[in-house]
Image (cartoon, rainbow, N blue to C red):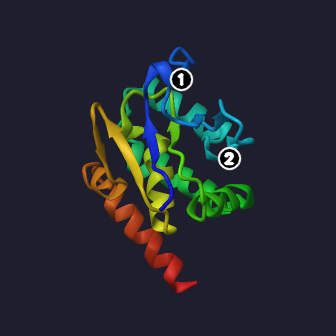
Amino acid sequence: MPGKIIFDSRPEMLYGADKNTPYRYSIVAGKPFGPNGNLGMFAPSKQLWYQYLDWKKEGQWPEQFADGYAKQFLQEQSQSETAQDMYNRLVNRKLDDDIAMACYCQDWDSCHRLLVAKNLVDKGAQNVFIRDGDQLMTPDDAVAQVPGLTELFANLFAKAMVK
């Protein structure tokens, strides 16, 4: 059984202050901190990043997460061969080391790391979790807590089945 993939927002991981992190690999918003190669394909596009900043400035965040941001992010991910290759590599990993994927966003429920975690589970990855404080939850449980995301993923799944 492969190690856990934990999606997190711990400042000590993000800034490298915790030299005793239990994770062999730490990926920050798509940029590697460990010997794991380039995982920038899991970060939002520059265009989507600026759209997110506009939504925040206009007071429309996190309301735009499911209908705007998530929909665009998942479309970008599905069209990226590099991202698809990395999803497959993570799904089929043999490592028993835990992997942390972190982002600067404090709130997991309006961050792309939730979308990447759910994508991994939908593609067959095991031991994938979202950290919420001291608790770990499955991406399916996390998605169910965010209005509009369950429907978005169901629609994407239905479209994939038609192809």
Q: Earlier in the sequence, mark 2 or mark 1?
A: 1
Marks 2/1: CA–CA distance? 18 Å
Label disc, if present, on residue 41 of the rendered structure = 2
At which x and y percent is residue 113? 48, 43
Helix, strand or loop under label 2: helix
Helix, strand or loop under label 1: helix
Label disc, if present, on residue 132 of the rendered structure = none
Residue drawn at point x = 73 percent, y = 61 percent: 81
Residue nearest the observer in this picture, 93 or 150: 93
| 104 is higher (above) or lower (below) than 45 | above
Q: Please name the residue that numbered disc 1 is placed on.
A: 14
| 46 is higher (above) or lower (below) than 69 | above
Number of numbered discs visible in the structure rendering = 2
Residue drawn at point x = 59 percent, y = 31 percent: 50
Q: What residue type is labelled 1?
A: Leu
Disc 2 vs disc 1: which is toward the camera? 1
Q: Which amino acid does label 2 sit on?
A: Met
> How many neighbours does mark 1 have within 10 angstroms: few (below 14), some (14-19), or many (20 or more)?
some
Evaluate if marks 2 and 1 touch, with contact meaning CB atoms under 8 Å apart: no
- Picture quarter containing residue 63? top left
Residue drawn at point x = 38 percent, y = 33 percent: 61
Residue at the farthest bottom position? 162
Residue nearest the observer in this picture, 87 or 66: 87
